[in-house]
Image (tube, grey):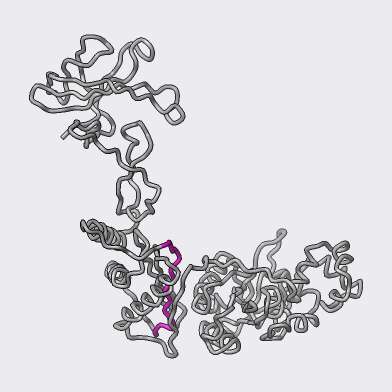
Amino acid sequence: MPRRYLALWFPYLASERLRRRGSAGPDERPLVLVEKDRGALRLADCDQRAFKLGLTRGLTLADARARIPELTVVETDPAADQRLIEWLAALCDRFTPLVALDPPHGLVLDITGCAHLFGGEAALRQRVGRSMDWLGLTVLASIAGTPQAARALSRFGRCAISLPGEDEQRTLPLAVSALEASSETVIALSRAGLKTLGDLAGRPSHTLAARFGEALVTKLRRVLGHEDARITPLRPPPDCVVERHFPDPLQDTDGLEEIVARLLGEAGRLLEARGEGGRAFEVSFFRSDGAVRRLQLETGRPSRDVAAILRLYRERIDSLADPLDPGFGYDAIRLAVPVCEPLGTPQASLDGRAVEEEAVADLVDRLVTRFGRERVLRFVARDSHQPEQEAALVPAAAKSNEALPWPVAQPEEPPARPLQLFEPPQPVETLAEVPDGPPLRFRWRRVLHEIARAEGPERIAPDWWRDGPGEHTRDYYRVEDAQGRRFWLFRAGLYGRETTAPRWYLHGLFA
């Protein structure tokens, strides 16, 4: 299937943005937007009335006022223009998931395989035009086989749709300015008698490259439709997409869940045929007024279980601070699966562990959906000898295929590490027979503990690449006092080699 692109250009975007906000003054007065350039205020953009009266971009404001005294003058705001064009890109996402910015003030849509959903390319182009007209925006739209050809036809030509194989025929009559080269290059081409793209196409490419550079020849090939340079969409294309378009805006919110369930079932069949499951799901609601609402769902493991994902959808709906508002109705609803992973046919285990794991995983998914990914955490083991670094907190929904196994205690042996650690370790006062031996007693929180048994030491050297050369070696002891309470103590610093006065700390309590 040949690729097809729809280029949209908004020639009066900045002025129409101000008109929509109602901050541009009376409608009958021409509007210009100015910016400071080389110490003078110059016209950065004009509305349609100002262009018809002969004003052009780059003209000084003084010259413009001399020609037309009654002007509405507003300072240009490129950031606001960028926000508007990005909002329009989100609006066009209902027509195709592949939408790219095309500066200045333009968009390019890859509509390959999408036009039939709207009744063909002509109907799709008309529908986009009606949407922009409803928003009060002027748009010039053209369809061609390459993004550059579609852009050139929308900005410099009059052809609305170039059928497959007609790009060269449609673009040859265009002026050389359609290549959007520098003004010096355009002047040089005109002086050489090359005024149209047809004149350039009739010259050997190596001659043009030697005189004007290879970039000009490459752009010419793309505008003529000989080379397709794919667009880079704002949102990466998902692995799986299913959607519903409605001939009339859908205003009945009670039926939304049923539509989402059908989309989930359709996506599940597609994923099952590929032997995959989804880890992330995105439901997008496209309103007829251009607003787009997206709901993100995430699972801790690959899934295509419609009932389980639908429960997450209900949890997400219930946790919304701003409920879904259909406004004038929804034009389309889309379900995208941006993250897919291999998923085989599940097998039931005889001991019932699989059922327990599924229940825990479902609970984690529901908590993540309600409270957020970063608020539901779990412990994972880490490859470190430092006790405080042997475990870490990570999002519970994060992928855990590469997680390290937890150390397994030896049968009938006391645990090597306590369940409770102090952060930071708490200093204690001790009495020992020798400086490098175990303590006989220690005082912690004003209570004196007589040690009945001690086991150790377990020497743990510092991580020199992380802690630096000044960190001391630790000698850990498992001790038990006369009342049977068990503690985990360590001495910081080797006597005579690292320090002359080692310090003792209590790092943890055994159950």
Give me the residue at 76% from left, 76% from top.
Answer: 224
Start-end of magenta stretch:
328-342
Q: Main secondary structure of the magenta part?
A: strand
Q: Quadrant of residue 308?
A: bottom left
Residue 145 vertical position relative to residue 280 in the rendered view, above or below: below
- x and y percentages locating residue 326 in the rendered image: 36, 81
Point out the image quarter for the N terminus: bottom right
**Near-viewer residue (348 or 40):** 348
Of 196 and 206, which appears nearest the observer?
206
Q: Residue at x 28, y 18 (%)?
A: 503
Q: Is residue 282 magenta?
A: no
> 87 or 361: nearer the eye?
361
Q: Residue 99 location, x and y as percent?
A: 56, 72
Is residue 71 visible to the viewer in this orientation of the structure? Answer: no
Residue 329 lies in the magenta stretch: yes
In the displayed structure, 413 sits above or below 11; it is above
Q: Is residue 502 left or right of residue 463?
A: left
On screen, 363 above or below 378? below
